[in-house]
Image: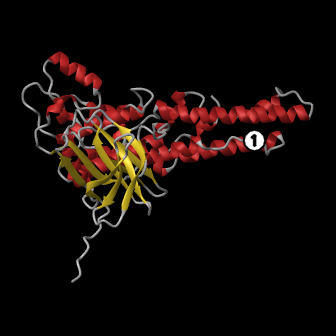
Amino acid sequence: MHTRTKPDSGAINRYRRKIDNVGGNDSEYDSEGGTTTFRFYRDLGQGRRAKARLFRSDKGTKRVILQPSDPRNVDTAEAKNKADSYKTAYPSRPVNYFEFTAPQLDYRLDVDFFPGNTYEQSNINTPSKFITHYLAAARALRAYHDKGRVIIDLKSDNMLHVASLLDSTTYLIDGGTSRKIGEPLGNTFYVSSDAAKERAKELCWHYAPECWFMRIAPLADVKMDVYALAKTMGAFLPKKSGLIYDSLISPYLQLNPKLRPTLDELEKKLLIFQKIFLVVDEIASISTDFSGFSSRKEISDQSVLLQKQISKLLNSDTFLSNCTLLEMHTLHRDIHDICYKKSQEIKESAQMRINQVNHVNGQNPLTESTRTALRNVAIFSHRDGVNAALGGIQTNKKSVGTFDTRFDCIR
């Protein structure tokens, strides 16, 4: 008679196989079907209540094992919450929670390994990168809410981002404070006084302010996550003002949860900003290398060509129509500054190259011909002119207007 082997799901078995004699940590696990051995690979990180360790099989399969950071302070309720959160968010991925009572209370939470960098590790240093990460996180959070759960503890090291050529994906991890929508929050958010509440809000600044309670626990609501996401993403911006902050962060930090826009509204606005900043990024990436030109005329012609390239991008249907959707009837200072910076780069690079050419030819670099060659290099000499030209954009989508080509001249 043949015994049927239990199918191997890839998850670990209930029992630890080997203990590291030095650190006392688990060093090996068997898979659930008993066909694979997972060995300790490296530590992933440690929080106040739990630490994460990566295990890998000989075939390269990876599993993450979470266990208490301090064996004297074991929070099984938080660990079970994490297990429920992972099962909700990623139902096709195996999750196992094991609890032990002897020789003392202990647990192991076995979850799948997710690739990517945390938002904390990501280099979010341009508007486009910011928008891409924000959009991926908003989509992941909306999918999480659609499954009936609120994650609450949404912060930069609890989000993993994976970029690809066609798209980007964010994975939401942890979930120790998560709750079903409409379920009372846990005692993590209990405070004994108003002073304690203010200290908690300062220490855990990413939590929505309505999470904290002294008597009756509030019910988990999606607007708590909307606040946490905006608060977390706002921390990546260099200033708490400007086009992006005022449009994509500030409205979602309203103290009254009912006044915060929805994630659907946020996603629509992010898509508009993404299209606008694709154009702005293209302007910022224009090469200002004049080293291949050997005469004043060639340099002047190239300067005009670059000037027209910027004007064409700003007059494109993509840019103008999306500005209209944001009711942007003047070129915002943040966008103007990027264009002006590129204009100055063109001007300075052209002037430097003409000076080099004149020096080789034994000519004075400040001759009238040099000034003439540089006359049309600077596109944006002052902001008022830019705003006047952008006034051609109408709220009527049938007539979005174009930029005034007079930008092409120095004022």
Residue shown at 18% from the left, 16% from the top: 195
- Residue highlighted by disc 1: 290
Dot 1: within a 10 Å radius of its alpha carbon, few (fewer than 14), some, or many (20 or more) residues?
some
Seen at 90% across and 34% down, the residue is 360
Which of the image's four quarters has the C terminus?
top right
Residue 89 sits above or below residue 394 on the image? below
Q: Quadrant of residue 284?
A: top right
Q: Residue 389: horizontal and vertical position, in percent?
A: 51, 36
Q: Position of residue 357 (x, y in %)?
A: 85, 36
Q: Amino acid at mark 1?
A: Phe
Residue displayed at 49% across by 47% down: 278
Q: Position of residue 178 (x, y in %)?
A: 20, 42
The figure's colour scheme reads secondary structure
Residue at the spot 23% in from the left edge and 77% down from the top edge: 3
- Identify the residue at the far front of this view: 21
In-front residue for pair 286/179? 179
* Image location of residue 137, percent across then percent down: 34, 46
Q: Residue furthest right?
A: 362
Q: Which residue is at the far top? A: 195
| Quadrant into which the N terminus falls | bottom left
- In this view of the protein, which residue sits in the foreground, 337 or 166? 166
Local secondary structure at mark 1 = loop
Residue 177 appears left or right of 125: left
Is 184 in front, or is 70?
A: 70
Q: Is any part of residue 342 visible from this angle?
A: yes
